[in-house]
Image (cartoon, coloured by chain):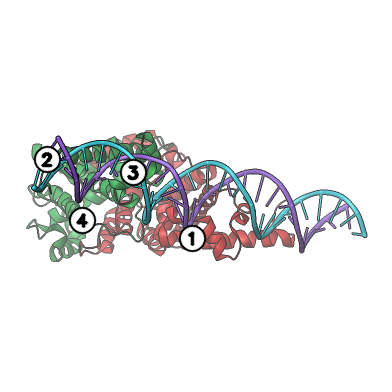
Chain colours: A red, B green, C cyan, D purple
DNA sequence: TGAAGCAGTTATAACTTCTAACGAAAGCGC
DNA sequence: GCGCTTTCGTTAGAAGTTATAACTGCTTCA
């Protein structure tokens, strides 16, 4: 029953075909978005007929969920290796942006419009929270931000809130200022990235990278 | 030929039916997202059969485009009235958040996952740039931010870039610091709002409003 | 070699958007 | 008021989708 690794040639063939299906699915998603993903078109493209794909994926939603899982893994890997090399929020941010620009629809599969009823499986939410850990570990070393007493006063309320509810960070023992910075790393960069990838900056004539770098400069002092 | 206002009873009936179709469409979108919008289901719900709707909307995409247009108008109105009452970035921000929370899918119709090929009509992009004007006018009065020389130095590069490319702001004569603040108002709040509406904060146990207000405090000093 | 499982096929159901052709009703000009 | 024209809503149907059921062959395994 093939306990762990793919051993039998049949399993290898099966894994290879699953991979090819996902490959074609990514192409379609990149071209027309997740909405435009058609199992029939994939099957036809692979030279086999419609329902054959249901041997490999239980449903269209099942395939998409798998792609979302892969997207999360890809992002987590990218962030993890970036965090391993240089422990700086800036390199982390640039790695994130490069990953997003590499395949915008893959980014939107994670951070795009949600389906109202959809609830992500537990393993996916686990990866999601693991992704948050990298900026947390990276934001910590620099210690207190405090570019002025003014800012500290402004952030006191939020930092108290974050210090009391740190389950989102898996009870990470970082100082409140680091918690806040890791969170802002996430929300601010996502704000710019999301708008850029959706094309809301096109026609404005300004460079999103400039805006992005400015936010990064504010995050890592 | 009904030059301007709806005059003839036929035109009134037509306008009313169009409005009812859009009403049902909004309900469906709120329930299942834009992807789950079905013209057939709307027709059945209204007691008439399928193709009848094509008398009122040329296609499904045409209806969605109309809904996007309405969403933009609704947002523009909300921002405009908020800017008219209290000239403060904070009230502008709270109005934006209330509008978004009122109908998340309406927000995502504007700022959600884009369809790769889709190009918004000119009148929509016009409204989009008009929306930017409110935070620009509001961010201006306070003048230079400069909570410290440090921050000013950090922002010099971006502000120079913004000052040189101000066509996105319709050549608005605001000082560079105000340009930057209006832009950050947009990207930072969108970052939090988008993640909140997509449910990325659920399970984290922290209050998005706290984070949102913290960003607002930093934007309007 | 025989038995069992798996891959891929066609057929079919139940959907969807959208076009075409038709009947009926309403409005408009005379 | 009468007739013509426009518009509305209908049914029929084409082409597409997801998904299931049943059947054929091939592979694998004991």
Q: Which chain does the residue under circle 1 lie in?
A: A
Secondary element under disc 2, as helix, strand or loop, is loop
Secondary element under disc 3, as helix, strand or loop, is helix
Secondary element under disc 4, as helix, strand or loop, is helix
Q: Are marks 3 and 4 on the same chain?
A: yes
Labelled disc at residue A26: 1
- At x 21%, y 45%, the residue is B218
Q: Measured from the top left, where is residue A15 in percent x and y?
A: 64, 59
Q: Which chain does the residue under circle 2 lie in?
A: B
- Whether tag 2 and tag 1 are in contact, CB under 8 A, the answer is no
Q: Mark 2 = which residue? A: B7
- At x 17%, y 45%, the residue is B76
Q: CA distance from mark 3 to mark 4?
A: 31 Å
Q: Mark 3 = which residue? A: B52
**Badge nearest the viewer, 2 or 1:** 2
Q: Measured from the top left, where is residue D20 in percent x and y?
A: 62, 43
Q: CA distance from mark 3 to mark 1?
A: 36 Å
Neighbour class for label 3 at 10 Å: few (<14), some, many (≥20)?
few
Q: Which chain does the residue under circle 3 lie in?
A: B
Q: CA distance from mark 2 to mark 4?
A: 30 Å
Q: Which badge, 3 or 4, is on the more N-terminal residue? A: 3
User: Would you say residue B210 is visible in this rendering?
Assistant: no
**Badge nearest the viewer, 2 or 4:** 2
User: Would you say residue A100 is visible in this rendering?
Assistant: yes
- Whether tag 2 and tag 3 are in contact, CB under 8 A, the answer is no
- Whether tag 4 and tag 1 are in contact, CB under 8 A, the answer is no
Q: Are marks 2 and 1 on the same chain?
A: no
- At x 42%, y 62%, the residue is A31
Q: Mark 4 = which residue? A: B125
**Badge nearest the viewer, 3 or 1:** 3
């Amino acid at each position: 029953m093939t306990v762990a690794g793919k051993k039998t040639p049949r399993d290898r063939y099966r894994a290879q075909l699953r991979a090819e299906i996902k490959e074609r699915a990514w192409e379609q998603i990149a071209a027309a978005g997740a909405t435009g993903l058609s199992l029939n078109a994939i099957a036809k493209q692979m030279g086999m007929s419609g329902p054959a794909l249901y041997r490999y994926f239980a449903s269209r939603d099942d395939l998409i969920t798998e792609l979302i899982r892969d997207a999360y893994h890809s992002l987590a890997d990218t962030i993890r290796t970036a965090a391993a090399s240089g422990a700086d929020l800036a390199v982390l941010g640039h790695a994130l942006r490069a990953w997003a620009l590499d395949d915008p629809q893959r980014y939107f599969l994670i951070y795009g419009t949600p389906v109202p009823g959809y609830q992500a499986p537990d393993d996916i939410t686990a990866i999601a929270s693991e992704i948050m850990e990298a900026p947390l570990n990276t934001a910590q070393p620099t210690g207190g931000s405090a570019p002025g007493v003014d800012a500290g006063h402004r952030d006191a309320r939020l930092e108290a809130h974050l210090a009391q509810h740190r389950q989102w960070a898996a009870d990470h023992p970082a100082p409140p200022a680091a918690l806040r910075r890791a969170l802002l790393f996430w929300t601010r960069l996502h704000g710019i990235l999301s708008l850029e990838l959706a094309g809301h900056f096109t026609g404005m004539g300004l460079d999103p990278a400039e805006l992005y770098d400015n936010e990064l400069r504010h995050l890592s002092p």
